[in-house]
Image (spheres, grey):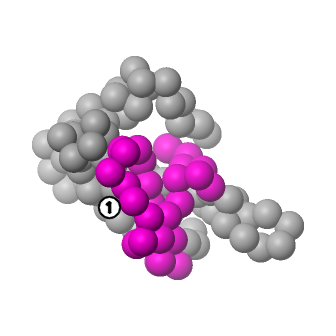
Amino acid sequence: MLFIGEEQLYSETRDLSAGGMFIATDVSLHANSVVKLSLRFDGAEKRGEYLAKVAHVRRDAAGGTIGAGLELVATTPESRLDWVRHLHWIQEHGAQPDQF
């Protein structure tokens, strides 16, 4: 499972050109919902968009979303392989996703 934190949540107006791993906040984040996870690295050279199932959501005391645990929804071996490659890229470049 991959944890995506508050700094990785974005609205459609956020500039993603610098790269990173993001999930849209325009969708309802609740357990068992399916969301689109965007992975963009090195500008637009490496990127992928995947469906992910929300396993759990972390909220602050005021009820604001501060993160979510995600599981990849993959239908083909190729999409699972791409996902693994993106996670390796994250780890090689210093970002360490929390694992539960």
Q: Position of residue 10 (x, y in %)?
A: 49, 64
- Closest to the observer: 19 or 91? 19
Question: What range of the chain is rendered magenta?
Answer: 1-28
- Closest to the observer: 27 or 44? 44
Q: Badge 1 is on which residue?
A: 51
**Residue under the point 15% across and 50% down:** 76
Instruction: Report the number of numbered marks.
Output: 1
- Is 79 situated left or right of 65 in this image? left
**Residue under the point 13% across and 43% down:** 78
- Closest to the observer: 75 or 26? 26
Quadrant of residue 30 in the image? bottom right
Question: Does the magenta segment cover residue 6?
Answer: yes
- Closest to the observer: 55 or 14? 14
Quadrant of residue 52 in the image? bottom left
Q: Position of residue 94 (x, y in %)?
A: 49, 24
Q: Position of residue 44 (x, y in %)?
A: 22, 46
Tell me the kind of residue under disc 1: Leu
Question: Does the magenta segment cover residue 49?
Answer: no
In the rendered view, would you say 97 is above or below 92?
below
Is there any visible trace of residue 53 in the rendered image? Answer: no
Q: Position of residue 71 (x, y in %)?
A: 44, 52
- Is 68 situated left or right of 70 in this image? right
**Residue under the point 63% across and 62% down:** 57
Circle 1 crowding by C-alpha within 10 Å: few under 14, some 14–19, many from 20: some
